[in-house]
Amino acid sequence: MKIAVLVKQVPGSESPLNIDSSEKGLDESQVTYITNESDNYAIEEALQICDKGEEGEVVIISMGPERVQKAIREALAKGAHRAIHINTNSSASSDPLVTASALASIMKDEKFDLIFSGLQSDDLGFGQTGVVLGEMLEMSTATLAMSTEVVDGKIRVKRELESGYFQWVTMTLPASISVQSGCNTPRYPSLKGIMGAKKKEITEVQFDEIDTFQSVKRLYSPSNSKETVMIEGSTEDIVEKLVDVLKNQIKIA
Amino acid sequence: MDILIVLEDSSGKIHRLGLEAIVAAQSLANSQKLSVSSLVIGMNADDLSSEASQYNMDRVLKVKNDLVSSYSSDGYTEVVKQVIERESPKYIFFGHSYQVRDYVPKLSARLMKPFLADSVAFEVNEGLTVSTKQMYNAKLLSSTVPDCEPPYLISFQSAAFNSDNIILGSAQIEDYDISFDSSIIKTQSEEPFKESGEDLDLTSADLIVSVGRGIGKQENIPIAKDLAETIGADLSSSRPVVDSGWLPSVHQVGSSGQSVAPKMYLALGISGAIQHVVGMKGAKNIVAINKDPDAPIFEIADYGVVGDLLEIVPKLSEALR
Ligand SMILES: Cc1cc2nc3c(=O)[nH]c(=O)nc-3n(C[C@H](O)[C@H](O)[C@H](O)COP(=O)(O)OP(=O)(O)OC[C@H]3O[C@@H](n4cnc5c(N)ncnc54)[C@H](O)[C@@H]3O)c2cc1C
Ligand SMILES: Nc1ncnc2c1ncn2[C@@H]1O[C@H](COP(=O)(O)O)[C@@H](O)[C@H]1O
């Protein structure tokens, strides 16, 4: 079983997000980056298939500038076997068709049986890349995976539906599956894993840019339309005012 | 045909996000003098088409092929693609439902046309199409434009348009023939089911204390629990708290959890992502404690505290006891 995992590096939830002078992207010098949340679940899902005795290889694939090698090393330290880094400057892709085309062009000869991706990136949030890539590589696709099992050369996927429902679907391989957060318990890298990761191979490739199909014209902060009463002061003041709001404004009791 | 709305089946009725997409289409059609049609697919297509025909639009296309009597991403992609190729709409509208997340990216790849997903606003101005989209977990907004010729695929976030504004009318229903080979469907689906287990009904709760990832770790959950018990509130949470195993999934509020409408929703360390907000925005009073002054939760909060919940909440419980 040859498995690819798409890993994107995104700003951490506590990172400052300052819009740059072009008003189309972020001032990256201020940003602290982490691995996209649902991608950690995608990595774990792939590693578990190999742990279960499926002979296999887990290949991490990430597209972005130099900095994404940190996310790649972290995934290798968890147990992935090797990685491909598609080197771009960061503004290159705010278009899922472009990102997926780049991924497809370097992945098509690898003949992966499975691709795992996150359901949605926490920065641009298209929620499309894994499916678009799967389609470009003529694979079966499924989204919102909560559980997977490989049986008889097919993959069974438990998908999350709306209103608390789930559904099992069975698909032929090769397949590209985007996973929902919470589908497993992602492992942490071990010390041995971290040491071992240093020796693992990261292949760096460039890609030829293609024309975009959609692009961000402007990035801006939302304006707050609702009147929010802000409660301020020392902790004691805040507690006192909150008690008053709860008891006398909202009348909780 | 200018605008095609693809309507989704929700147990024999039009999915509520579909009704909102109709409003989006009607308002664009009105400002730009465009024609609107809709497409219904599957075993409930008869019911859906008669419901759709009561709204102001030109045509309702009804596809009842056996291969798409129930949903599959391959089947739906093929049907919508064929309709687009035959009818050449400029804009194809969807509600941003789970089903749309699942197959519309595939359609986008097959057509090599952009999918402007999860739009919160949409306008066409002097020929320029602009979708407004939340980015960075709703902390920023973007104006996104297509860079190629139409058609454009556009989906709308829940509540981007208000279905109360739907315009009634009467539309022509047409049986629409689509054929394709069954071999293109690569997935086999089983019956949808609900997970059995512990039950907790938060929908009628009067007071709710809700914890987000900002609580930091499982060992801190009692801080929130204690406050909830002190004021007689139920305890709920955001998804990451459940994903991390800090609380059982029955506590989850949001698009994949419960929808609640209490008198007070006290959000502790919850950023206010749309998938959470859809489940609690109906609360009468929203109180938020968050250490980030720019957290999107403050955009919907009635009362806000910028501060450390770990410091404030224990003292608040103490003061209320
Ligand atoms: C298809 C889909 C379905 C989803 N369904 C749901 C759903 O049903 N419910 C749901 O909740 N989410 C859902 N999500 C996830 C959602 O997008 C968000 O990721 C999630 O709601 C974020 O949870 P959070 O606010 O707890 O965490 P974060 O976004 O990480 O926010 C944590 C907040 O805590 C604050 N904080 C940190 N420390 C402190 C402190 N000491 N004191 C005060 N504040 C602090 C931070 O400033 C931050 O704002 C879904 C996502 C997808 C794609
Ligand atoms: N630049 C990238 N490099 C690697 N994987 C990516 C990249 N962009 C998106 N992905 C993958 O696609 C998923 C969905 O991203 P998106 O379509 O942007 O919401 C992410 O969770 C990643 O798994």
Image (spheres, rainbow, N blue to C red):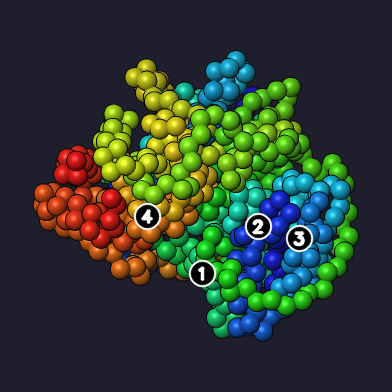
Q: Can you identify the residue that label 1 sits on?
A: B121
* Alpha carbon separation for disc pair 4 and 1: 29 Å
Is B263 situated above or below A103? below
The foreground one among B136 and B237 is B237
| Secondary element at tag 2 | loop
Q: Do labels 4 and 1 share a chain?
A: yes
C-alpha span from label 2 to label 1: 19 Å
The quadrant of the picture occupied by the C terminus of chain B is: top left
Secondary structure, mark 1, is: strand
Classed neighbour count for the residue bearing mark 2: other residues with Cα under 10 Å, few (<14), some (14–19), many (≥20): some
Q: Between disc 4 and disc 3, whose residue precedes?
A: 3
Query: Label 1 is placed on what type of residue?
Result: Ala
Find residue B23 and report its image quarter.
bottom right
Asked if the residues shown at circle 2 and circle 3 are in contact, with their CB atoms under 8 angstroms apart, the answer is: no
Horizontal side of B239 relative to B269 (left or right) equals right
The residues tagged by marks 4 and 2 sit, at their Cα atoms, a distance apart of: 28 Å
Q: What residue type is labelled 3?
A: Leu
The reply, left or right, for residue A106 in relation to residue B236 is right
